Structure formats: structure tokens, C-alpha cells
Amino acid sequence: MNTVSIETFDTATNKKRTEYRDTILFMLNAVNVNFILLRATRPGENVPLSYDQLRVASAHILSAIATGKTISTLLNPLSICSKDALPLARTFYECILNASFVLTDKGVLAERASKYTIYKLFKKQKNFFDFGVHKGLVKNDFGLRKNDPLVADALSIFEKKAGGGLRPCFTENRSEKIRAIERISPGAAVLFNGIEAMSWDLASEIAHGSHFSFDITQSNFSGSGPFFGPEEIGAFATYTMVCSIDAYLRVLRSIVSEVGGTGELSEACILFYQEEVPELANSLENLTR
């Protein structure tokens, strides 16, 4: 079978970043396991997080970890495909942002996310399509019925919008989520805002397949190569991942006493700053929680 062949290459710096990314993802997974088991391992303690918060936040972190592994695959080794690591880093960031966001209240947001899952599955059991003369119905039976108490409860929350259509899980945009996080951890808000300023726009351009994204990541029209070649994309993606993780740890440690592994992972983030951006390392380390 004929296939498209992609040329690959690598650099010493990228190999080091790949090893680092894989290490912090392993450490983040260990922290998340301890987070999931928080109530079981502290039976006599007052854990200031609801069951829904533990379940929803940990699910977001697991999604981030899976996305992070895909990012490393695209960047190890480097190739023309490496550009897609940045939109995935944006997804990684959103997973971490949402995990942090659901930890900012007493469990209302996490409970809403759980009920939204039920609502979305129920609404997607029947999908209508209309292609002019061709109309029909696609059925996906997830076994959810309208008279089920859980379904009825979810519908009572999300089906109040006039005019039909699916309501979103959260009405807050990213800026509003960051403001909510800022009340818990100003340092985390600074890091999240830094990610927004650093990589969101370029990640969006790449994700939407714009000509702008092609020109600055692939073409040689400037005479000196792309503005953001594969290695630069790898750096931006790695910065996004590390800053996101650092921000999440700040939120988590501001709410609940030490979760196993958070101290070591926080130190790993600091080490990254010292090696990659030494001129900013002290400022990033000294951010208030």
C-alpha cells in the first residue's frame, strides 16, 4: 500500500524536552491517583472537596495526560506534523483550566458537569439530519429515558433555553474561569493568563487550518525559514503544558493540604523554568499561590 512519507529529524534540546514532558506527565498521573484516593486515604479528616469535585477534576486531568502523550508523539522526533502539537497543547491547557475551575467552589460546578453528561447523552440519542430532499433520524440508544430521575433532574437544569439547541455545561468563558481561579490562587491566574497571551492565538490558527498558520510554520517566504519551526512549536507546547500544571498545583495546594507528589511535581516545574527561561525563573517561582 502506498503511504505518504514524512521526513523527521531531532535535536539535543528537543530530546531533552521530550524526556522532561514524559517525566512530568508520569508525575502528574501519580498526583492524580493520590487526588482520586483523597477521601479513602484520609478517612478521619475533613477533605474540603466534594465527591463530584474529586471525580470531575480528576477526569479532566486524565484527559490532559492522554493529550500530553499525544503531544510527545508528535514532537518525538520532529517533523512537519509537529505543528499540530500546539493546538493539542491548547486542549491540554483547557483540560487543566477546567479541572482548576471546578475546584473553586463547594461542588456546584462539578455537580453541574456530572448532570450535563447525562443531559448531553440523553439529547444525543436522537439526531435529525436534513440534506434537502434527504431527511432522517440517526438513533443512538444509551438506555436513558426521560422518566429516569437522573435524566429528569439534568433536563430541569439544561432545558430552560427557549428555541431549542443544546445548552453549554458552563456559561463562563475562559476569562471568567480565570477570574474565579484568581480568587483562590492569584499565581495560577497569572500563569493561565500567560498561556493565553503566549500561544492561544497561534494554536487557534493552526487548529483552523489558516493560510497564516501555514506560512509562519512551514513556508520559507521570509528567506530565513519559518517563524515557528517544529522545534519552536515544541518549545511553545512544552511551556504551555508546564505552566498549566504549575497553575493547577497552585490551585490544588491552596484548597487542600499536601496531596502526595505535588511537592515533587512543583519542584520539577521550577527546574524547567530555571533551565528554559532563567531570566524569568525567579519571578515565576515567587508568584503567590
Image (cartoon, rainbow, N blue to C red):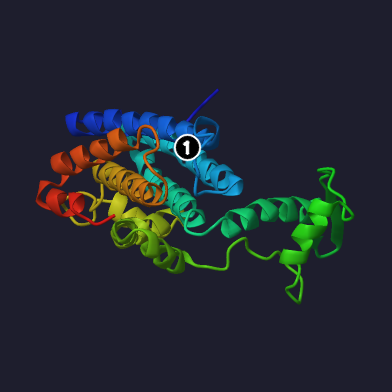
Q: Position of residue 25 (x, y in %)?
A: 38, 33
In which quadrant of the rendered view does residue 275 lie?
top left
Residue 280 point in image, percent of width and height: 14, 52
Quarter holding the C terminus is bottom left
User: Farthest residue toward the left?
Assistant: 279
Q: Residue 89 or 8: which is nearer the viewer?
A: 89
Name the spot of residue 220 as percent of width and height, x first: 24, 51
Q: Give the vertical position of 192 relative to 88 (above or below).
A: below
In terms of secondary structure, where does tag 1 sit?
helix
User: In the drawing, does residue 163 fall left or right of residue 103?
Assistant: right
Q: Is residue 177 left or right of residue 131?
A: left
Q: Is residue 123 above or below residue 14?
A: below
| Up-down relation of residue 263 to residue 205 (above or below) | above
Quadrant of the image occupied by residue 212: bottom left
Q: Nearer the viewer, residue 280 or 287?
A: 287
Quadrant placement of the N terminus? top right
Q: Judge whether residue 82 can be spotted in this image.
A: yes
Q: Amino acid at mark 1?
A: Phe
**Residue that appears at 36% across and 51% down:** 254
Q: Give the residue number, with chain letter if any, for mark 1.
A: 35
Q: Position of residue 217 (x, y in %)?
A: 30, 50
Of residues 8 and 189, the one drawn nearer to the viewer in this rendering: 189
Q: Quadrant of residue 55?
A: top right
